[in-house]
Amino acid sequence: MSSTRFGIIDIGSNSIRLMICEVTENGAYRVIDESKASARLSAHIDSNGNLPSSGIQIIIETLAYFKKLCEASGASSIRAVATAAVRNAVNADEIIRLTEEGSGIPVEILSGEEEARYGYLGVSNTLDIEEGYLVDIGGGSTEIAYFRNRKLQQSVSFPFGSVNTGKKYLRNGNLDAEGLTRIQAMVSQAMDKEPWIRKHPGLPLIGLGGTIRSVSKLDQKRKKYSLPLTHNYPMSAQDTDDWLSILMPMPLEKRKKVPGLAKERADIILPGLAIMQAVFRHTGSRHYIISGAGLRDGLFFEALSPDKPEIDNVLEHSVRNLMSLHPAIPYSHLEQVNRLAVTLFDHLQPFHALGARVREYVHVAALLYRIGVTINYYQYAKHTFYLMAHSRIDGLTHREILICSMIASHKSKSRTRSLFLEHKDILTESDFGLVMQIGSLLHLAIALDRSETQPVNKLQAEVFNKELLLSLQIAKLADIELKEIENVTPDFEKQWGLSVKTAVAPK
């Protein structure tokens, strides 16, 4: 079986986007290309509610170009969907007919409920959150959903987004206090018709869509955030309030020069922020979590697994996918190190009293610690840190991604301290100690399979009077492992305050 590639096109109200995905022969997947056209279809809708020929031509030309990109990449299929601008247009049928004739690509119109469902699928498969609200602010619509136990409970689509709201309330690209009040009143009145939106205060509000991602990039730029990841980035209510206060007084031309803000979003960022703030207040949410995944990702997961597109364990799925994208790594060795590291952690539980979440860090770091070798053996720990910290390990917060990356790439106290200082805006001082401690435990587990031949069949670890006794049941000669244990025990003893003794018994 060879790898397959396919294209997913989202004809949105503000932009038309293409995502080309690849599924490798061993089942791993990744995005290999993206393209975007700023179409502003909602702004083209005339007074009769029709999308004129000029707007339709933009869709045709964009899809024709995207089709060429897909063909050049070797994509075997293309799925194109249209959302609010086309869905709400009076001449929707004509738009689809002319687009299909002109581009040769079949186009589906998604209902508001389908749009919310696919958006939620993209979020739930990439964020490990049990309950919350979701808001997707597009150019011509806003979808709000409530989920519990990682299942979609309710959703609604409103016919206002950043483009059509801006068209109605902006004056020369600017938003004054009166316009802000009117937007927020409009949003609140619409949400009042859906009582469930107010019924679950105190939950996170998951934000997706171009407007919300733009706000998060602005926020990261202002705070000099040290990890360039948008997905799972947290923001507070105060952050959005601050950005409204900063951007509203600026004339449009000055807004176009704000670091981190794309010029084509300089006008619609304000109505988008106003909608975002109104939804946050109405839901009574605790904080925002920004999602880099959404509608297109949901469509991808359905294509990947039509019978069951939902992922049960987000973190495990993400780690295994990352491993599969690097087939040169020594799988048997990594599975053995993982088994040994987790066993050590469990047997030391009465001594360290660390929780189940730290056990997950051990698991992730053990499976991924050699991933950097796929770049180069020399300095592979450095490559491992970079790949893990920048590969978007779903199911972990940004802080947890850094902790796992530092554990997996742990070499010395000075190097760990250097990485800690580089990311001190995200990490806490206690995280440094945790990385040092779990890093030394991982080194001990690695030593127990230094030959990468899995000689240790069974490991027992017991603590007596400040002494850790390792009882090893071996299937074959383990001289290499015993020598390596001697090399790594000084660091382990320093971090844990336990001397290490080893007893070996044949199987």
Image (tube, rainbow, N blue to C red):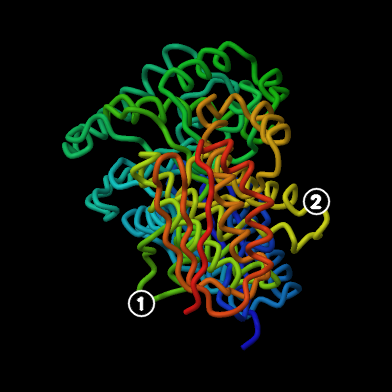
**Crowding at mark 2 (Cα within 10 Å: few <14, some 14-19, many 20+):** few
Whether the residues at callouts 1 and 2 have beta carbons within 8 Å, the answer is no
Q: Residue at x 27, y 27 (%)?
A: 284
**Crowding at mark 1 (Cα within 10 Å: few <14, some 14-19, many 20+):** few
Q: Residue at x 16, y 36 (%)?
A: 195
The residues tagged by marks 1 and 2 sit, at their Cα atoms, a distance apart of 43 Å
| Residue type beneath disc 1 | Asp
Asked where in the image residue 448 lies, by quadrant, the reply is bottom right
Q: Residue at x 48, y 31 (%)?
A: 272
473 or 397: nearer the viewer: 473
Q: Secondary structure at mark 1?
A: loop
Instruction: Measuring from the top left, give residue 194's x and y in whole percent.
Output: 19, 39
| Viewport quadrant of the N terminus | bottom right
Whether residue 102 is visible to the viewer of this picture, yes or no, is: no
Whether residue 168 is visible to the viewer of this picture, yes or no, is: yes
Instruction: Please tell me the numbered disc located at residue 437.
Output: none
Count of marks placed on residues: 2
**Where 261 sits versus 39, above or below?**
above
* Mark earlier in primary sequence (1, 2): 1
Instruction: Measuring from the top left, give residue 462's x and y in whole percent.
Output: 40, 52
Asked where in the image residue 133 lies, by quadrant, the reply is top left
Q: Residue at x 53, y 19 (%)?
A: 243
Instruction: Measuring from the top left, give residue 71's x and y in whole percent.
Output: 71, 75
143 or 360: nearer the viewer: 360
**Where 188 sits versus 291, above or below?**
above
Asked where in the image residue 7 lies, by quadrant, the reply is bottom right
The residue carrying mark 1 is 307
As drawn, is 152 to the left or to the right of 434?
A: left
Instruction: Measuring from the top left, give residue 104's x and y in whole percent.
Output: 62, 76
Q: Secondary structure at mark 2?
A: loop
The residue carrying mark 2 is 379
